[in-house]
Amino acid sequence: MFRKSMISALSVAAITLGGVGSASASDCTVKLGAILPVSGPMGQVGERISATGQFAVDQFNEAGGVKGCDVKYVLRDTQGQSTIGVDAAKSLVDIEGVQALIGAVSSGVSLPVLTSVSVPSKITQVSCCSSSESFTALAKEGKTDGYWFRTYSTNRSQAAMGALLTANSGFKKTAVIYVNTDFGVGLAKRYAADIVKLGGSISSMVAYNESQQSYRAEVTTALQGDPDSLFLVAFPVDGSTLTREWLALGGTGNLIVNNSLRSSDYFEAVGSKHLQKLQGYDSAQPRIPSVANFNEMFEERFDGPPNGPGLHSVYDAVTVVLLAMEASDEITGENIRDNIRIVTAADGEEVYPGPEGIKRAKELLAAGKSIRYVGATGGLQFDQNGDVQAPKMTWKLVGDENVETGYFTTEEIADLIKKLDD
Amino acid sequence: MIGLISYLIFFLILALSFGIAVLGLNLQWGYTGLFNAGVAGFIAIGGYTMAILTGPSRDAVLGGFEMPFVVGLIGAMIASGIGAYIVGLATLRLKGEYLAVATFGIAVSIQLVCLNWEYLTGGTLGLIGIPNPSKDLATGPLAQNAVYLGIVIVIGGIAFWALERIVKSPWGRMLKAIREDEGAAASLGKSPVRVRLESFILGCMLMGLAGALLTAFIGYISPSDFLPIVTFQIWTMLIVGGSANNRGALLGAVLVWGVWTSSGFVISKFIPAEIQAQGGALQAILIGLILVVTLLMRPRGLIGEEKHVSRHASL
């Protein structure tokens, strides 16, 4: 039984491999690998991210694909486990022959994939969602060889936004409850340092571990010291458990939440009527027509607005990689890496998401011009470590409606961070 | 073709590294009857020891020893052995399901310690930049991985050979005697508690060794690598391959890891793109189904237990 399934898997692999060779001659396809957690603890988030990645590929194909070839989006599930993710990435690279990888979501999967697959095999890896500062550290040591990019802004700017929102609301004593992952710990620590500089203070810092039935103990600890506000760093499922218990035990309704909680799952699970004093921040969709355009296209395809973590950023990750492929003479990981800089050049001509924008971009690239892709998350500017700085927005709930309350440009964020770091 | 070979080498490195942990579990469960549900914890101890001993210096985290790979391997075995000694003293008077619950709890605790003791483990950020010895021995990813596979095969081979010798020795037969009838073994003057402790420590040292090999290969370690699912995977490998048989343990490791990973490949190949996102659930169903079918068709695993008698005995 096992032998049989192994043999059939291997023969499938062999057939595919044969297929790649012949495909390039006749009907051409270009493969883009995606390693995302579509099952396991991050499954809910991962499914939507993956569907949005597919959407970006479909739009690119509508505009004629890469160099006239159809792009095939090859998805592999990481199950949220690093060994599975590493294996999936390796099989995409070796057997499917992909030259670029999208993913993963959690840093604990993206990092081993980067160090054991992408860098040694010279494959460009672009993550939509990994926020850990370890990537920046690795890039500074020169260990990524430039193959690492992310379209999701790092913890640094998120912490600054959370702190700014807290200080501007006049809160003086804030409790912090954060998810005990690299994302949560990094963000909460930065936030604690930032809020003090903006004149606030921390009453308690409480980490919680994911997927528990109840967080009564954590909430009780956080309630000590009589905080006037709560900064909550969580994901929708655990976040709603925490918020319900926080409110039930008498916690203040003055909530500041991270961008992952800007999700209808969360609002519905807690009940919007209990969240009328909630505020949050997120990567902004800049006020340029093209972005509204993206949101419209998204709504048309999915019958709902693109609310949720990673959706805008995965769209941009996919589009940037495909544009870089288009700009390459030969599609190799190395060329994609170099050309990502060309398609996001600061002095390039601006192009926007959607089939029309992509067509325009392809014309400009064909004419040998550099372009500046201004995408679903705004103008993408990768620094030398592959990190991106994005504009931010703040939001709150009015009734069931998610309303934008403020907008911060990339420059404003950079100034804020500079002020906080001094 | 190169791509397929390159992937198979990569696959075997992971599968055989897991195989070494399965060999350790086989000594404990297959030969001694110890239900160790804390495998992930001992793999973690080995992995972190390797990362700390061989890794570069880090801000605010213990490290900077930059010791050779071999020292990392030996250190990992010693550390997991010490961990097993402490755990064993506390729990080995328990049996069966009680031992399972206790060791499971310990593995979860070890994972939480890794998550929270930032000075030692880097906390949730994990430890980066762990050197892979094959990078100095060869150039190009394919050759490097081939060298690393060679290292894993040699180390796994030594472990296999040693275990085969051990289980055929008088000590090995004593393990089985204790597994089958503790009272009878004790009446012959054997000390079940002591022997169980020895077997437990030796098995955990192999798990630590597996963790060290995996960590040096991947170059990164974080607490999310040691969730209870890892214990479940190692157990599945042993049960499918056949417990109380070292060949079965290695075979199970390769086959189960193969099914686990190739099911993802098959799904990405044959499920239409629109419902790919639901493929994860299918994969879980597929793996579960294969497990259940194996247990129904071959309850003793693919290769069952071999009979061992002393070579001095005449049958």
Image (spheres, helix red, strand yellow):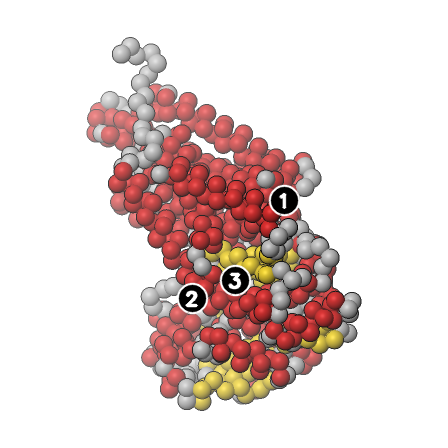
Identify the residue at image location x=67%, y=61%. Answer: A67
- Where is residue B196, by image quadrant? top left
Please state the horizontal and vertical placement of residue B268, each as a whole percent of the image: 47, 54
Is the Cβ of the residue at disc 2 closer than 8 Å to that at disc 1? no
Q: Nearer the viewer, mark 3 or mark 1?
A: 3
Determine the CA span between mark 2 and mark 1: 35 Å
| Kind of residue sitting beneath label 2 | Gln
- Mark 3 chain: A
Determine the CA span between mark 3 and mark 2: 12 Å
Identify the residue at image location x=68%, y=53%. Answer: A332
- Mark 2 chain: A
Please state the horizontal and vertical placement of residue B77, each as a whole percent of the image: 49, 37
- Mark 1 chain: B
Please state the horizontal and vertical placement of residue A148, each as a whole percent of the image: 64, 59
Please state the horizontal and vertical placement of residue B61, each as a whole percent of the image: 59, 54
Callout 2: helix, strand or loop?
Answer: helix
2 and 1 marks on the same chain = no
For residue A40, side relative to residue A50 (left or right): left
- Where is residue B240, by image quadrant? top left
| Kind of residue sitting beneath label 1 | Pro
Front-lying residue, A93 or A184: A93
Front-lying residue, B170 or A68: A68
Report the quarter where the N terminus of chain A lies.
Answer: top left
How packed is label 2: few (under 14 Cα within 10 Å), some, or many (20 or more)? some
* Disc assigned to residue A44: 2
* Disc assigned to residue B131: 1
Report the quarter where the C terminus of chain A lies.
Answer: bottom right
Q: Which residue in the protein does label 3 denote?
A: A105
Q: Earlier in the sequence, mark 3 or mark 2?
A: 2
